[in-house]
């Protein structure tokens, strides 16, 4: 628990420092006003640090839920609705289960490890947030503006997820 908190804090702090420095530099190209420069650095650093904390927390949460399982892509959703989900046993439920079992056997060996799915909720959350913020501020070239943020968040998410999986495997060995 404490190690998880430290990992989250370090991720947020690194994002804060990097993006605050970037905002300071980027704005120093157009102004020499220290108040404006510090404000830009504080706003961008705080936003980036905060969203990185939320992103990393979401990654850690879904890593605990998904990482040690395998998922057959066509049946991620249907397997949630197994016949045990139905209140009564019926022919429809039996047919549904037989069909799912048959298709799962046919897909044997084509399942994905959960570690590949782990970053997707965090990427979706961060992507939705960055798009919403840019829509709210009426960014003229929305998709070109947000694409790098989403792309680098996805790269970060997969690297973070894979490193969590490796640490977990090393701890179990």
Image (cartoon, rainbow, N blue to C red):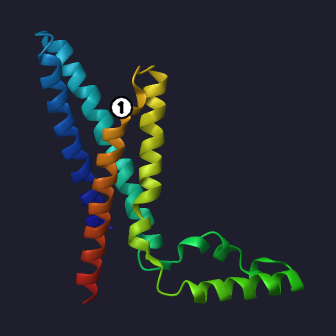
Q: Nearer the viewer, residue 144 or 59?
A: 144
Considering only vertical position in the picture, is 127 above or below 44?
below
Counting labels gives 1
Q: Dot 1 lies on which element?
A: helix
Task: Assign the C terminus to one quadrant of the image.
Answer: bottom left
- Label 1 crowd (10 A; few <14 / some 14-19 / many >=20): few
Considering only vertical position in the picture, is 114 above or below 171?
above
**Residue drawn at x 45%, y 64% as measured from the top left:** 62
Q: Nearer the viewer, residue 10 or 142?
A: 142
**Residue drawn at x 25%, y 59% as measured from the top left:** 7
Which corner quadrant of the image does residue 139 belong to?
A: top left
**Residue drawn at x 23%, y 83% as measured from the top left:** 170
Considering only vertical position in the picture, is 140 above or below 44?
above
Along the horizontal axis of the image, is 72 left or right of 170?
Answer: right
Considering only vertical position in the picture, is 147 above or below 117?
above
**Residue 41, visible in the rendered structure:** yes
Along the horizontal axis of the image, is 24 left or right of 82?
Answer: left
The location of residue 24, given as percent across then percent down, is 15, 24
Q: Nearer the viewer, residue 108 or 145?
A: 108
Farthest residue, direction front: 106
Along the horizontal axis of the image, is 99 left or right of 90?
Answer: left
Which corner quadrant of the image does residue 140 belong to?
A: top left
**Residue 90, visible in the rendered structure:** no
The location of residue 157, given as percent across then percent down, is 33, 57
The location of residue 88, given as percent across then percent down, is 88, 82
Question: Disc 1 designates what residue?
Answer: 144
**Residue drawn at x 81%, y 87% as measured from the top left:** 94
Task: Assign the N terminus to one quadrant of the image.
Answer: bottom left
């Amino acid at each position: 628990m404490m190690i998880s908190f430290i990992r989250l804090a370090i991720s947020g702090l690194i994002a804060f420092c990097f993006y605050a420095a970037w905002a300071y530099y980027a704005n120093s190209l157009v102004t020499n006003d220290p108040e404006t420069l510090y404000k830009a650095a504080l706003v961008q650093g705080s936003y980036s640090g905060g969203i990185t904390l939320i992103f990393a927390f979401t990654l850690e949460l879904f890593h605990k839920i998904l990482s040690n399982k395998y998922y057959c892509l066509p049946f991620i959703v249907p397997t949630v609705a197994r016949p045990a989900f139905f209140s009564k046993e019926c022919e429809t439920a039996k047919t549904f289960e037989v069909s799912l079992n048959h298709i799962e056997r046919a897909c044997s060996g084509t399942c994905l490890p959960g570690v590949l799915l782990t970053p997707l909720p965090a990427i979706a959350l961060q992507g939705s947030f960055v798009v919403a913020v840019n829509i709210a501020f009426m960014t003229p070239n929305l998709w070109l503006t947000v694409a790098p943020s989403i792309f680098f968040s996805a790269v970060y998410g997969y690297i973070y997820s894979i490193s969590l999986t490796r640490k977990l495997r090393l701890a179990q060995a």
